[in-house]
Amino acid sequence: MKTVKKVLFWTLVVFALIQFIPIDKVNKPVDKAVNFVDAKKTPEKISGLIKGACYDCHSNETVYPKYANIAPISWSVKSHVNEGRERLNFSIWGTYNKELKESMLNKASQNIQNKLMPMPGYIVYHKEANLSDAERTLLVHYFEDMLKTKSY
């Protein structure tokens, strides 16, 4: 029994100490001239869907939830945001070359259509990101139209 108490005690101590290891939650400023929804003059309905379902991980406009203040959960959240921004960052859309934009739009369309994005784990805690089939179709068509007309 003593061993269990020691393990529990040290687990709590370590948990308390890791709370002092913060994550960087400061978003870079957004330049509307290169931000996807602004630069592309995205229709309001589409813009709302993209911002509600994509922008937390794929832009510099991340709104960190309260649970992102608790380590080690915060580390996982930050890792997902960093990875999302590396793959596609709507806030710097205008800085990408044409080939990269085309590739990103294709991948986004496929991932939305195949329900890989938004990530199922994200949807559990962010109901606003749970896109209906009609909303998914709307986004996919918007991205595909951009690809067809090369207006990316």
Image (cartoon, grey):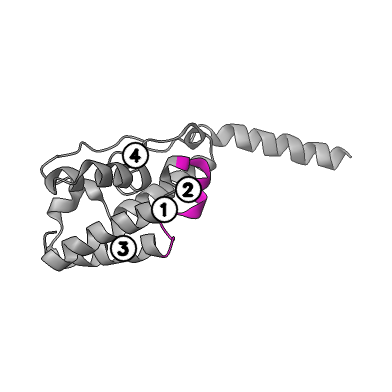
- Secondary-structure class at tag 1: loop
The crowding category of the residue bearing disc 1, from other C-alpha atoms within 10 Å (few below 14, some 14 to 19, many at least 20), is some
Disc 2 target residue? 122
Q: Secondary structure at mark 2?
A: helix
Mark 3 and mark 1: Cα distance apart in space: 11 Å
> Residue 57 placed where, x, y %?
36, 47
Disc 2 and disc 4 in contact, CB within 8 angstroms: no
Residue 22 visible (yes or no): yes
Query: Amino acid type of disc 3?
Result: Ser
Q: Is residue 33 toward the left or the right of residue 120 in the image?
A: left
Give me the C-alpha separation between circle 2 and circle 1.
7 Å
Residue position marked by numbered label 1 in the rendering: 118
Local packing at callout 3 (Cα closer than 10 Å; few below 14, some 14-19, many 20+) is: many
**Residue in view at x 11 percent, y 65 percent:** 150
Q: Nearer the viewer, mark 2 or mark 4?
A: 2
Q: What amino acid is at disc 2?
A: Tyr
Could you tell me which quadrant the C terminus lies in?
Answer: bottom left
On screen, residue 81 versus residue 28, left or right, reads: right
Find out whether the residues at labels 3 and 1 contact each other: C-beta distance under 8 Å.
no
**Residue 25 as seen in the image, left or right of residue 102:** right
Which label sits in the foreground, 2 or 3? 3
Q: Earlier in the sequence, mark 1 or mark 4?
A: 4
Please give the range of residues in magenta: 114-127
Give the percent coordinates (x, y) of residue 144: 23, 64
> Could you say which disc has been placed on residue 109 in the image?
3
Q: Which residue is mark 4?
A: 62
Q: Mark 2 vs mark 3: which is more N-terminal?
A: 3
Of the residues tagged 1 and 4, which is closer to the observer?
1
Residue contact between numbered discs 2 and 1, judged by CB atoms under 8 Å? yes
Q: Nearer the viewer, residue 7 or 36?
A: 36
Task: Give yes or no for contact between labels 3 and 4 (Cβ–Cβ under 8 Å).
Answer: no
Q: Position of residue 112 (x, y in %)?
A: 37, 59
